[in-house]
Image (cartoon, rainbow, N blue to C red):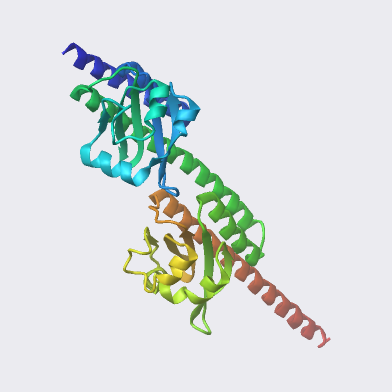
Amino acid sequence: MAKEKDYFASFCKISRAFGTAASKNELLELIVQNAIDTMEGKAACLFLADERKDVFVPVAQKGLSDSYLHASPIRARTTVEALVKGGHLAFTDAATDQRLENHAAKIAEGIASILTVPVIVNDRAIGVLSLYTAVKRNFSEDEINFLKAMAEQGGIAIENARLLERIQKNSLLFLELAAGINSTLDIKMVLNNLTVEVCSALGMKGAAIRLFDQETKSLKLVASNGLSDKFLTNCQNDLAGATIPAMEGTTITITDVMADSRINAKECLQKEGIGAMIVTPVKSRDEVIGLFNLYSDQPRRFPSDVVTLVKALAHQGGMAIQNASMYLKIQEDKNNLEKDMWSHRSWF
């Protein structure tokens, strides 16, 4: 019972520390340091998923040399499958366990046993937390449960920190783009800047803006970034399943283009290296006048705040078009008025 109370007290202490961490880096350091301190380990390392490369990369560690950390990357898919299936991986003898690689490196590092647990948020593994000991150890159920609970709590804190960073970054992006949109009536420059800046800020492969041509009753490309001419010319029909609802005013997110039934011929997207996409309407007042398409180079979940940002930027683009149209109309009316006034003068 004494040991259980120690774990409970440690967990409460760690939870409070997570809530007061000043930065994400400080938070990551807290996770590994508390794992070592509470479980009396030699070292600990926190790996977070890099989905682009299908690996977990070390983001915080204590007690391990750099040469050991980079000896072999942890493959994300295989590791996650094993961890999710069993809830954890325990290696009592890390120097001989056939499930592990680089036994010589572990011996040289002084690692005897390893306990690894997943960092799961919203049923998705975003990382891995590993504890290393200097002497062989059979990890108890309490120890395993504690490390799993701490990893879960740490994962929530990491996601909250990421969300805060993303909201701050997105707010700044919106402010900068909105200021740029309001500073000029050059619509071509505004829309081109919008595609470039959004791709850069959100890590997207490419973007395209198409406006509806009333004469031809079709969407015409007016701005793009990061996409080939062949794709822009030939692949529009492949996206009809997403385009039609968007033209009716609904924002469409496709997390995996190869698995989504709304995408018709998928070959065109595959050749372009597109894995996911967002399609949102561009509106002038309440009328849909075009579409803003964003493309990712891999399957990807889009957080709700990112989708909201994209919708808001598309709305800003629509307002810029509306303002420019009103300005041109005013100029035309002014010219007509001046001509009319000049004709009246000829009467006198």
Q: Nearer the viewer, residue 160 or 288?
A: 160
Residue found at x 26% / y 33%: 89
Q: Which quadrant would the N terminus be assigned to in this image? A: top left
In the image, residue 179 above or below residue 26:
below
Extreme-bottom residue of the structure:
347
Where residue 251 appears, as percent x and y from the top left, is 40, 62
Extreme-top residue of the structure:
2
In the image, residue 271 above or below residue 140:
below
Residue found at x 67% / y 65%: 186
Residue found at x 47% / y 43%: 166
Q: Nearer the viewer, residue 281 or 182?
A: 281
Q: Nearer the viewer, residue 340 or 212?
A: 212
Where residue 188 appears, as percent x and y from the top left, is 64, 66
Where residue 55 appears, as percent x and y from the top left, is 41, 43
In the rendered structure, the answer to whether residue 101 lies left or right of residue 318 reads left
Where residue 114 appears, as percent x and y from the top left, is 31, 27
Locate residue 336: give its quadrant.
bottom right
Q: Which quadrant would the C terminus be assigned to in this image? A: bottom right
Q: Is residue 128 visible?
A: yes
Extreme-left residue of the structure:
1
Locate residue 13: give its quadrant.
top left
Q: Is residue 122 visible?
A: no
